[in-house]
Amino acid sequence: MATVQYETHEHDVIVIGAGGAGLRAAIEAAAQGVSVGLVCKSLLGKAHTVMAEGGIAAALGNVWPEDNWQVHFRDTMKGGRMVNNWRMAQLHAQEAPERVLELERWGALFDRTKDGLISQRDFGGHRYARLAHVGDRTGLEMIRTLQYHGIHQGIDVYMECKIERLTKDGDRVSGAFGYWRNSGEFVLFKAKAVVLATGGIGKAWKITSNSWEYTGDGQSLALWAGADLIDMEFVQFHPTHMVWPPSVAGLLVTEGVRGDGGTLKNKQGERFMFNHIPDLYKGETADNIEEAERWYTDKKNNRRTPDLLPRDIVARAIRAEVKAGRGSPHGGVFLDIASRRPADYIRKRLPSMYHQFKELADVDITKEPMEVGPAQHYVMGGVRVDADSTAATVPGLFAAGEAAGGMHGSNRLGGNSLSDLLVFGRRAGLHAALYAKNLGGRLNVDAGHVQAIARETLEPFNRTAGENPYAIQADLQDTMQNLVGIIRTEEELKEALKKIEALKARARKVGGGGGRTYNPGWHTALDLKSLLTVAECCAMAALERKESRGGHTREDHPYSDDTWGTVNVVLSQRDGVTSLRREPLPKMPDELKALLQERT
């Protein structure tokens, strides 16, 4: 059998993914004096982080001096329904303010209060206004700032490169093998440490805010290399996305619209969120319109509007309204800010939303309401990591951002994603660099293993009459949308797993067609491996967790169960077979438990 040719690059640390977490990891690793390579599937700057519009959650106390890391910690744990990794939530709340100020020092241009401080807006589940923002383009400003800072750090950037497998030297990760998307030629990256910052899994669903890159690469790479995944049943369906026209269904409508005063209404004009307040939030959420309106003028002393409840609650409420026949004409509900804020205010605070609806739906949000509905947006689960170091359960492997699990528990609060990227991206880069320094010498890469990966990657070209990869992906997206969506049942989850097994069999017969140069069909065929892997993990974990909590709702187990509130569902893979087990949550110190009992 002919030897497959590939080029080789060697670094102390390889970071896979160039969004907020990957860039921050690469910057921090380079600051430790090690050689860093940054690999991205698309073009630099085309990170999904730019879609995070509303802001960065950090208890700066600029709008409400009463805010502090303890309140932020409490909000995060409560939003995640207490199955968060408490240490990750603690570190995140404590370190987020410095990470935001660091961005400012590096040139980020935040909106300002009248006193010249970084402005902060309200978001769902946060007790105080704490999202540092740049209009509704915060993620874009974060990426711009990190890229401009990063290019001066001596980081080598490898664009349009898809990683297919991690390589190992014994038990340790020793690099990554992939191909250039434009030419199809293979490339091997040798490294003492690898950081996964590849984002989410959204392209396994039909309607998602995620772009084409989000095929679960990092989660699958970790699982195949012997690492654990955690909390994969917890998938966030963000409540507000465009629902019309069909060509833009799933495009995100920032929570900042509601944070700046927008309200949700059904087709009868009723502010229906007052009918969907769970017991957990009664007492701190307004139960009538008059009380909610007072909150906008005196947010400290009045109970907040239910339009800003955590995302899982709002998404289920919208689904209930639509199911009851009270939805908008195109299967969503109405989001109204036009009747509540002046046109100039809307255009200044929400410029992207204004242009998005004007250009894509011919809707002027300063004059009429938007039609919105839920869509898959985020996965709380991911690679199981150590809270302090972000180290996975395989030596030499680290993960941060959406690719890592634990931080957000069963539901992520809006704005916590961007601060998560900064806090744990920095920690991943730091500890990966320290690991590489301590390792010393060079790791070996098994040439035979590399050849086997390369031959497997080329297999679709041997099937001239193979299965259509686009058809398989479409069938997977329908399966996940219909059977592993906002509401789940045992029967449907079992059906989903059967269908995924059948799709895996079809994927083994997929054809590539044409040659290796500029071949999107081949790329899709290869992406199917990771998509099917993470889809199976989600369905397996959802079937195992027999309760409803956060982003996981079981119609046949509609209530939260205290016995499930003390365990994680952990997935691992050996010899190609995925298995799961339950493990107890890490024990929380008494002083942090006490914070959760406080009324803040």
Image (spheres, grey):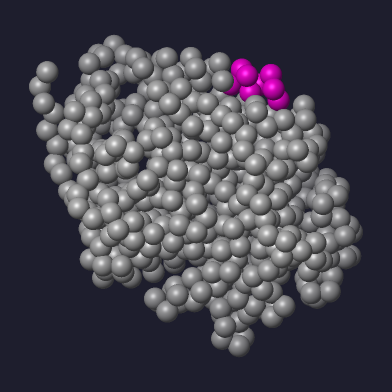
Q: Any magenta on residue 488?
A: no
Q: In the rendered image, which quarter is residue 231 located in?
A: top right
Q: Nearer the viewer, residue 251 or 35?
A: 35
Furthest residue toward bottom: 115
| 502 displayed left or right of 166 | right
Quarter holding the N terminus is: top left
Residue shown at 54%/76% (left/top)? 111
Q: Residue at x 39, y 76 (%)?
A: 106
| Residue 471 screen position, x and y as percent | 43, 21
Residue 70: where, in percent of width, then height?
Answer: 68, 69
Q: Position of residue 166 (x, y in %)?
A: 31, 38
Q: Nearer the viewer, residue 495 or 324?
A: 495
**Toward the viewer: 114 or 508?**
508
Q: Is residue 223 visible?
A: yes
**Above-or-below relation of 369 to 329:** below
Q: Is residue 3 above or below residue 123?
A: above
Q: Position of residue 496 (x, y in %)?
A: 58, 21
Q: Is 343 above or below relative to 356?
A: below
| Magenta region | 489-496
Q: Quadrant of residue 597?
A: bottom right
